[in-house]
Image (tube, helix red, strand yellow):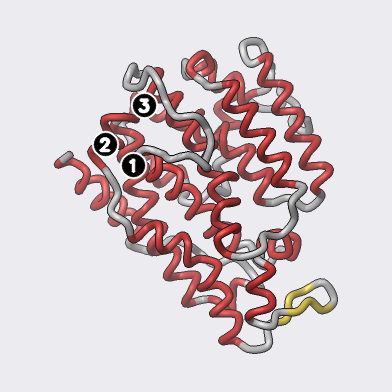
Amino acid sequence: MPTDPSELSHQQWCHEQLAARQPPWPLLQLFIPAGQRASLLAALAFQQALMELVLSVREPDIASRKLAWWEDESTRYASSLHPGFKALRAAGLADCWDWSGWRAWCVQLHALLESGAPADEPQLWRQARLSAGIGTQLAMAALARRTGLAADFEEADIDRQLTVETQALVDTTAAWFLIEVVNRSSVQSVLQRWLPLALRARHKLRWQDGTVQPCSRDALSLTITDMLQPAAAALQLDWPSGEVKKAYGLPVQRLLAMQRRLAIDALQRLRHQADTVLRQPVNLLGPLSAWRCWRAVRQTARF
C-alpha cells in the first residue's frame, strides 16, 4: 500500500482523504454536533478511500491490486497499523463495521474496474450507486450501530429493494459521485472510463490526440446534461428526513440534508459551465453555500 502508516496520524489521514471530497468536510462539520464529528469523519474518510480509488482510476490493474490490499487488510481490522483502520478503532466503529459486507463490496468493485465504460446512462447510474452508495451505506450503518439506533441493517446490495432512508443515502452519494466524474472531465482517463458509449454516439463525440472533441458547444452541454440527469432525477424526489434521523441519527440526517442541497447547486453550476469543464474543474460551491447548509439543517429541525 503506498501510504506508509508511520507517516500520518489517523486524524491527518482522515482529513487528507476528505481534502478533495465534495462537498468539503470543513464546511459540513460546522453543522455537525462537536461530540459526533470525529466518528463521522472517520466513517466518511474510510469509505472515501475506496470511492476515490474507483473514481480516479487510470490503470485498472493497479487499482485492482490496491483494492485487493484493502480487502485483505480488513481481515486484520483490529490490529492493522494503517491509519484508516486506526481511525475506525479510535472512533469506536471498527467492531460496528460490517466487514463481510465491506469485502462483498470490494468484490463488486473488482468487477466494476474490469467492466470498462458504461453502455448508457442507466448503467452509469448503477455504477455510481455501486461505487459510492454502498460504501456510504456501510459507513452510516456502522455509525447507527455504535449509537444503538440500528441492530440490523440492509445487505450491501443495490440490486435489492432498499428502505426509503437507505435509498436516500445511496442516491445522494451516487449523485455526488456523478458530479465529481463530470467535474473531472478534464482528466481524460476519467472521461474515457465514465462517459457512456451511447452518449458518445448520440452527440458525435470523438477523441483526437487523447482529448475529446465535441462537434459543437451544444453537443458538449447536452452530453453533460445527459450524464447528470440520473442524479438530477434522484435529487428531485422528496427525501425521508425523519426516517433517516430515526435509522441513522442526527449527524447523518444533517449531513444528508446539506449534501442534497449543495448537490442541486453543483448540478446547476456544471450545466452552466459545460465549456469549462473539459479544460479544468469548476468551483462547485458559491458564496451562499454556508447559508444553504444552515438553512438545510434548520429545515430538518422539525423532524
| Image marks 3 and 1: residues in contact by CB distance under 8 Å | no
| Image marks 2 and 1: residues in contact by CB distance under 8 Å | yes
**CA distance for labels 2 and 3:** 19 Å
Give the residue type that dot 1 points to.
Answer: Val
Q: Is residue 173 above or below residue 101?
A: below
**CA distance for labels 3 and 1:** 24 Å
**Front residue of 87 and 243:** 243
Within the image, what quadrant is residue 118 found in? Answer: bottom right
Location of residue 215 in the rendering, given as x and y in whole percent from the top left corner: 68, 88
Location of residue 105 in the rendering, given as x and y in whole percent from the top left corner: 62, 34
In the displayed structure image, the side of residue 277 where residue 38 appears, left or right: left
Give the residue type that dot 3 points to.
Answer: Gln
Q: Outermost residue toward the front?
A: 160
Q: Secondary structure at mark 3?
A: helix
Which residue is at a point 31% across and 38% down the rendered structure image?
Answer: 253
Which residue is at a point 70% across and 28% down the rendered structure image?
Answer: 70
Q: Is residue 161 above or below residue 235?
A: above
**Front residue of 146 and 116:** 116
Location of residue 280 in the rendering, given as x and y in whole percent from the top left corner: 63, 69
Give the residue type that dot 2 points to.
Answer: Glu
Name the residue tied to disc 2: 243
Q: Is residue 122 above or below residue 126?
A: below
Disc 2 crowd, CA 10 A, few/some/many (<14, 14-19, 20+): some
Name the residue tied to disc 3: 36
Which residue is at a point 47% across and 35% down the rendered structure image?
Answer: 137
**CA distance for labels 2 and 1:** 8 Å
**Front residue of 93 and 246:** 246
Which residue is at a point 70% across and 26% down the rendered structure image?
Answer: 71
Q: Secondary structure at mark 2?
A: helix
- Circle on res. 164: 1
